[in-house]
Image: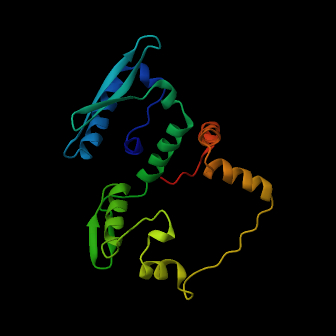
């Protein structure tokens, strides 16, 4: 759905206009082709929903011979999430003028859209760095642990206070305890309320 940032907004009324949706699909397919790579192919088409009299974009994702179909339905195009993406796209489209470029030190690159600038800057900034992730401190080598956590000249100590110790203990046991069912129930009942998920 990140491609929707760079595409014209689709209104609910447009979903009923086959010609308008076909024109939009040409632009969408062009965006998808930009991210195809070895073993990964996208095929986009319009699917008619006769019950609602609309044309819905459908994408077939073919990864190493296995197909997965995604249909963007009317509810998606009417959702707050889609409106947020479209609003972001409108804001980003005004950031770059003709001849825009990004520069870091002596290195410079011409860009036509915000994603190009961001991707280039991220690649430039990580050239001399290696990003590693650990599940816990015990997975680090001693020098890594010193550099990231233990060195008193750069570490920060934070004091955490718990106002509701009983409630905190209950939630900890629910999420980290041995019983699977309470954890599953918690996740199912709270999944849609998540706003900042690190994945």
Instruction: Quadrant for residue 70, please give it.
Output: top left
Residue 120, quarter of picture: bottom left
Looking at this rendering, what residue extends furthest in the left direction? 38
Q: Is residue 18 above or below residue 113?
A: above
Rendered residue at 48%/70% (across/down) = 138
Looking at the picture, how far across and down is residue 136, in whole percent?
50, 66
Residue 163 horizontal side relative to residue 80, left or right: right
Residue occupying image coordinates x 50% and y 70%: 137
Quadrant in which the N terminus appears: top left
Q: Which residue shows up at 47% across the image and 78% down it?
A: 145
- Tell me which corner region of the image, top left, top right, bottom left or bottom right, holds residue 172: bottom right
Q: Position of residue 146 (x, y in %)?
A: 48, 82
Residue 111 vertical placement versus 33 (above, below): below
Left or right relative to 157: residue 28: left
Q: Which residue occupies the foreground of this view, 50 or 186? A: 186
The relative height of residue 140 versus residue 155 in the rendered view (above or below) is: above
Residue 123 percent coordinates (x, y)? 31, 66
Applied colour scheme: rainbow
Q: Residue furthest bottom?
A: 153
């Amino acid at each position: 759905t990140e491609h929707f940032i760079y595409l014209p907004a689709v209104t609910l009324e447009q979903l009923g206009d086959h010609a308008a949706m076909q024109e939009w699909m040409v632009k969408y397919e062009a965006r998808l082709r930009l991210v195809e790579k070895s073993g990964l192919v996208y095929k986009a088409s319009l699917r008619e929903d006769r019950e609602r009299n609309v044309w819905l974009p459908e994408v077939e994702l073919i990864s190493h011979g296995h197909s997965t179909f995604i249909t963007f339905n009317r509810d998606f195009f009417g959702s707050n999430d889609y409106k947020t993406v479209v609003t972001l796209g409108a804001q980003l489209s005004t950031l770059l003028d003709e001849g825009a470029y990004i520069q870091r030190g002596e290195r410079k690159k011409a860009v036509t859209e915000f994603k190009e600038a961001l991707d280039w800057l991220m690649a430039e900034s990580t050239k001399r760095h290696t990003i590693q992730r650990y599940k816990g401190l015990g997975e680090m080598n001693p020098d890594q642990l010193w550099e990231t956590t233990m060195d008193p000249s750069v570490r920060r100590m934070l004091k955490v206070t718990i106002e509701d110790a009983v409630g905190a203990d209950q939630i900890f046991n629910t999420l980290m305890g041995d019983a699977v069912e309470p954890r599953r129930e918690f996740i199912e009942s709270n999944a849609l309320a998540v706003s900042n998920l690190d994945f």
